[in-house]
Image (cartoon, helix red, strand yellow):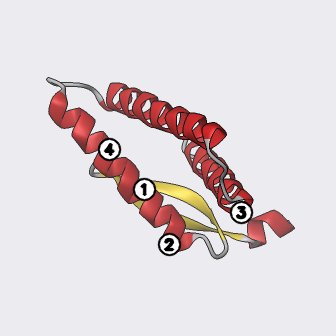
Amino acid sequence: MTSASRDQTQLTVRILGRDYQVACPEGEREALLASAEYLSRRMTTVQKKGKTLGMERIAVMTALNMARDLLDMEQRRKRAPVDDEASDRLSQLQLRIESALDDNR
């Protein structure tokens, strides 16, 4: 067993009524669960606004909305000084989310 696999566990998250198994780094369980809950809420909002969108389209539209929000936040951050620690934490969270989504492909 590699060091990386010992430092991660499998976690089931529910997004838009579907269960997904994702790798979860040690000590990140609560953050990942909160991220999945946030994503599910955002996807539910997109689903309710659309007619009969498929899951893939809902995911893409949600990702676009979240990317827009992230870019807006980055633009605001560039205009105002931000705590480096908070910025690093946001970057780490973004990488964990992307990693979790990659594990499900």
Location of the N terminus (image quadrant): bottom right
Mark 1 or mark 2, earlier in chain: 2
Mark 4 or mark 1, earlier in chain: 1
Q: CA distance from mark 1 to mark 2?
A: 10 Å
Q: Which residue is mark 4?
A: 42
Q: Are marks 3 and 2 in contact (CB under 8 Å)?
A: no
- Look at label 4 and name its amino acid: Arg
Residue placed at 43% from the left, 64% from the top?
34
- Look at label 2 and name its amino acid: Glu
Instruction: Report helix, strand or loop for mark 4.
Output: helix
Q: Is there any visible trace of residue 64 in the rendered image? A: yes
Q: How packed is label 2: few (under 14 Cα within 10 Å), some, or many (20 or more)?
A: few
Q: Nearer the viewer, mark 3 or mark 1?
A: 3
Residue 101, quarter of picture:
top right
Q: Which residue is mark 1?
A: 36
Q: Nearer the viewer, mark 4 or mark 3?
A: 3
Residue placed at 39% from the left, 33% from the top?
59
Q: Are marks 4 and 3 in contact (CB under 8 Å)?
A: no
**In the shown orientation, is residue 15 left or right of residue 81?**
left
Q: Which residue is mark 3?
A: 85
Q: Nearer the viewer, mark 4 or mark 1?
A: 4
Relative to 33, say whether 44 is above or below: above
Instruction: Report helix, strand or loop for mark 2.
Output: helix
